[in-house]
Amino acid sequence: MKMTAEALKQKVGQFFFPAVFINDTEENIQETERLIKEHNIGGLTFFHSRASAATNYESKKKVVFNDDSYQKIKDLIVRYQKAASTPLLISIDAEWGLAMRIEKTPQYPYAITLGALPATKADLVYEVGKQIGLDLKAAGIHYNLSPLADINNNPNNPVIGYRSFGENKQKVADFAVEYLKGMSEVGILGCLKHFPGHGNTNVDSHLGLPVLNETLEELLENELYPFIKGIENNVDSIMIGHLAVPSLNDGKNTSATLSKPIIETLLREKLGYNGLVISDALNMHSVSKLYETKGELEWEAFNAGNDILCFAENVPEGIEAILKNASPDRIEESFNRIRNAKEKVGLLNNSFTATGELNFEKASQLNLEIAKNCITKVIDNSVSELLFESQKNNKLAKLSLYKNVENTFFKTLNSKLPSPEFAFENLEVSDISLIKKELGNFETILIPLFVPKAKPLNNFEVQDEVFALLSELLQTKKCVVYVFGNPYVLPLIPNLSKASGLIEAYQDFEEFQKIAGIYLLENKNYSGNIPVNIDIQ
C-alpha cells in the first residue's frame, strides 16, 4: 500500500529533535509547541538556557541561574507532551548528572574522576549510571546523550578532557559500558559519543572543525575500540562527532556527521551497528555555517545516515528537503529505529511515568565511595608524618587557594591538625604579597588548590599570580599540595615536582574534601591512578 504524502511527512517529522531551553520566554515556549503540533517532531533536547548553549560562549551572554529550573523542566515536559500527538522522546546531556544542565540537582563526578578508579571498582561507574538514570526518570526524561567513548589521548584537547574516562582504551570501553548498563537497568536510553572518536583533536568542534589524521587501521586499534565494545553490548544509540577523518572519507575534510562513508560504510556495514544514530548538535559552527539554504544541512545529515537530527534549527525546511530527496525506504528505516527506542522506554504504550524524587543522600553516599577509591597519591614523602611533626613544632600553616578557610577539607583536619590558616579567594579580596609575608615564619605549608574551572581555557582560570606564589613556596618551603580539580592543571604548576607531597583529589565536592582530610589524618593508602599521562615540572 502506497503511503500518503501526509503520512510520510509525519514520519519525517520524527527525525527532528530541536533544542529547548528550561529558562525560556513564554513566546519561545509557544513557538516550540507550534513546532510539535505542526510538524510531529520526534523529540526534544533540553538545555539550561540560551546563554549556556556551548556555541553561545563566545557571545559572552551571562548565564542567569534559577533555583526553580528543576521544577520548570518537569512542568515544561508535561506541557510539551500535551502538545504532541506522537509522544516525544525527551533527551538531555547529563554526563555527570542533571547538574550538568540544572542547578540544585545531584552532581556526580566527572568521567576523568571515575577513570581514576581501579578497574575492580567498575561497579561504582554502573551505580553512577543507575543513579543518573533515576534522576532523569524523576524529571520525565527518557534519553541521556552520554557517556563519552572518546579516548583522552591529546592533553591539548579543549573540549573532551575531563569528560573522558581516560587514555586507556580498555578502561574507557569497560567504564562506558558499565555506565550504559546502569542507565539501562532503570529504563533510560544511553548514547556513546563522539564517533569515530574525538579524543585526539585540538579544536573545539562547537566552534571549528577538528581533523583526525589516523588511518582506519589506527582507528580500529584505538579510537574505535570503545564503540565496538558498546556495539557488542547493544548500546541504544551512537552520536556522530563533528570531526573530519580524511582517510575514511575519500581524503575530504568533511565532518563525520555529514559523511556517508563514515556512518553508512564504517559504522553500519563494517562494524555491524543497526541501532539509533544521532547527529551531534547541528547548531555547532563546524557544520552550521556550511550551508546558506535552510534545510540543506538537515538533509545532508540525514542523507549521511543520521536517524536523529539533534539541535536542528530549520525544522520545516529540513522536513521539506528530506521529503524531496529521500527514498521512502530510507525514511522507513530511520522512523523504525526511533519508534523502537520509544517502545523500549515505554512511551508508546504509556508505561513510562516520571517516578521518584531526586535522591541527594544516595548521591552523596556514592560520591563518598568514589572519593575513597579514586583519590590519587602522586608524590609522597611520608606526608602525614611531616605535617604532624611540623604542627607539633608550630611550623605548619595551611593555605587555601580559591576557597576561604571555612572549606570542608580544613574543617575535617582541624580536630587533629590545628594550625594557622590563610586563604586566597580571588585578586579582588586577597593580597598575595601579604599572604607571602605571613607564611614567611612557617617551614611546612599544606596547600589545597581548588581549581576554579574544569575546562583548560585560560589555564583553568588559575591566575599567573597564583602560579607564581605556588612556584616560590614550592622552592622555599616543604609543601604538601592537594589538588581538588582537573589533573591537567598539574603540569601548569611550576616546580611542582619539588613538593614534599602531592595528592590529586579531582573534585571539590564536600565528600572528596572530607575523604582527603580523613585519609591524611589516618595515614591511609590511596588506590586511585591518574587516568591520563601527566608530566609534572
Image (tube, rainbow, N blue to C red):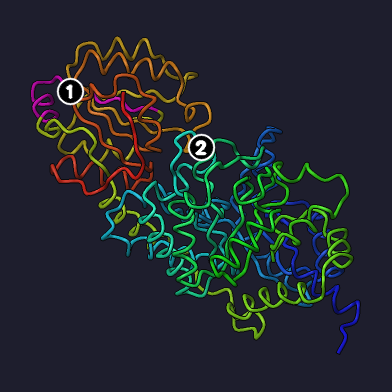
Amino acid on which the number 2 mark rests in the picture: Asn
Q: Position of residue 466 (x, y in %)?
A: 40, 19
Proximity of marks 1 and 2: CB atoms separated by less than 8 Å: no
Dot 2 falls on a residue whose secondary structure is loop
* Placement of the C terminus among the 4 image quadrants: top left
* Left or right for 311, reference 226: right
Residue positioned 67% across, 53% down in the render = 257
Residue mark closest to the camera, 1 vs 2? 2
Quote the CA–CA distance across marks 1 and 2: 38 Å
Give the residues drawn in magenta, as a range.
Answer: 386-401
Residue positioned 18% across, 31% down in the render = 418
Q: Residues within 10 Å of mark 1 (few under 14, many from 20)?
A: many
Q: Which residue is mark 1?
A: 396
Magenta span contains residue 180 = no
Q: Is residue 447 above or below residue 88?
A: above
* Left or right for 337, reference 467: right
Amino acid on which the number 1 mark rests in the picture: Leu
* Left or right for 200, reference 276: left
Q: Position of residue 314 (x, y in %)?
A: 83, 55
Q: Is residue 429 above or below residue 119?
A: above
- Seen as rendered, the residue at the extreme bottom is 1
Residue positioned 38% across, 33% down in the render = 450
Camera-side residue of 164 and 360 = 164
Q: Position of residue 116 (x, y in %)?
A: 32, 48
The answer to which of marks 1 and 2 sits earlier in the sequence is 2
Quarter residue 499 falls in: top left
Dot 1 falls on a residue whose secondary structure is strand
Residue positioned 53% across, 36% down in the render = 158
Q: Which residue is mark 2?
A: 157
* Placement of the N terminus among the 4 image quadrants: bottom right
Mark number for residue 117? Answer: none
Q: Position of residue 159 (x, y in %)?
A: 54, 41
